[in-house]
Amino acid sequence: MKRISIKLGKEMVEVNLPDNTEILSTKQPKPLRNPAFFIQKALIDSISSRSLDQIIEQKLKKNPEAKVVVVISDNTRPVPYKGKAGILWPILEKILAHNIPEERMLILVATGTHRPLSEKELREMLDSRVFDYRIPIKNHNCRDKNNLTYLGKTIRGSSVYINGDYMEADIKILTGLVETHFMAGASGGRKSICPGLIGEESIYIFHGAPMLASPKANDLIINDNPCHQEALEVAKKAGADYILNVTLDQDFKLTGVFAGDLEEAHKQAVKQIIKYVTTPLDKEYDIVITHAGFVGINQYQTAKTAIVAIPALKPNGKLIMIANNNDKDLIGSEKYKTVLHLLKIIGAKQFNHLILSPDWTFIPDQWQVQMWCRLFDKIPQDNFIYYSPRLSFNDYKIIPGVDGNIFLPRSERYKGNFKNAAQVIEKAVEAAICELKSAGQEKTRIAYLADGPYGVPVKS
């Protein structure tokens, strides 16, 4: 047997897999030895931009009472906002050095359509000095129409509403992580604004069914990706004076710092990740095992893991996924749960037909369910096994696929015991092999996607 270790947030699982399991993994980039040095260097030697200090000075000359907003990601992204590799305090330090008082500063959480973060969550995520200096922090609220500014329409017809606090600021700084993204090609850059700071109405076209039906709206595709193009157009309308984006390795260590112009700095970061996030693929597999990594804080986010696994799967193959859903909302929003349950009931083909109908009324979070349909276009729901220890029996009634708890003794089901995850995977693999043998298939191709949502299998 092959013994593998799976890291899911703070949890680690040791699993035994059959000897013929092929472990597919990405190239591991080298972490920066002195991340603090490279962060400071990037803030000075910026990409297609003046340094952050110069931008602040220029803005203060025009308006000595200038307001500053620093946009941060929410906790669905492992952006290093504290510690030796923390990117937030170096920015705030420069702002404070220009004698801009705390009352003219704002840290704005780009929640998009996600729920707001609690103070406890923010304290866990951010540098403690933010709270020592009492720098204001605010969650974006996409439904607060009184705090949204209308900026017109995009080429595709989206009504652009942007967070009012962001638009009132004189100095606009974006921060974030650049990693592969199953709709926009890559995260970071323009996504801090769109969808991070837009109004709910602005997402109807950006995440509408026709847009996401494009094959170009996929991992690592930037050119001609309609999702990327729409986000960039919205971000340019809103404006951004400076961005600081980073890339990370599988242990969340800093591998690159990209600061400067909204578009050009992001382009350089995307070039960086393309070098190492792809996994060469020369065949399809009967059984694929994967994990949701850090990103799988709820079932909504694990769609990313499913999408990257598709190229590795044979048609009608088996996908076994383990996740550590630990968010306040273990599955996702109520609207997401409603639309997800609809997919479970009617299937991918009918669901896609329904949401592409002109009579369909757009429902926020339907986009993530549409992404799940990509998986179920290749394999039936009964061939997808999903297990996350904290989910209840009723939770699994909503989720498409097979409840992983069936591979546990009845006494161990729905106990929230993370140690059971290994048994679920091992028993699910064993059952899949037996099923294939019963159907007359003696040799079974098995793959383990070691990087989960962070590695993109690409056919060679």
Image (cartoon, helix red, strand yellow):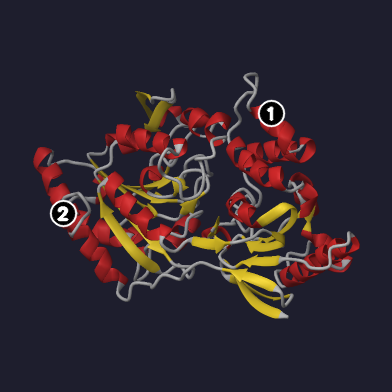
Compare residues 307 and 66 and report the one nearer the observer: 307
Q: Can you say which quadrant of the picture contains the N terminus? A: bottom right
Q: Position of residue 89 (x, y in %)?
A: 30, 61
Residue 223 sits in which quadrant? top left
> On residue 53, which mark appears?
2
User: Could you tell me which residue is drawn at 76 percent across and 41 percent down?
Assistant: 344
Residue 258 in the image: above or below residue 27: above
Q: Residue type at mark 1: give it.
A: His
Q: Residue furthest top?
A: 359
Q: Residue type at mark 2: give it.
A: Asp
Q: Is residue 49 left or right of residue 186?
A: left
Residue with the mark numbered 1: 353
Q: Earlier in the sequence, mark 1 or mark 2?
A: 2
Q: Is residue 351 left or right of residue 428?
A: left
Q: Is residue 139 left or right of residue 440?
A: left
Q: Position of residue 126 (x, y in %)?
A: 40, 60
User: Could you tell me which residue is drawn at 77 percent across and 71 percent down?
Assistant: 426
Residue 28 in the image: above or below residue 344: below
Q: Position of residue 337 (x, y in %)?
A: 68, 41
> On residue 65, which mark appears?
none
Residue 431 in the image: above or below residue 19: above
Real-space Cα separation, disc 1 to disc 2, in angstroms: 52 Å
Q: Position of residue 341 (x, y in %)?
A: 74, 39
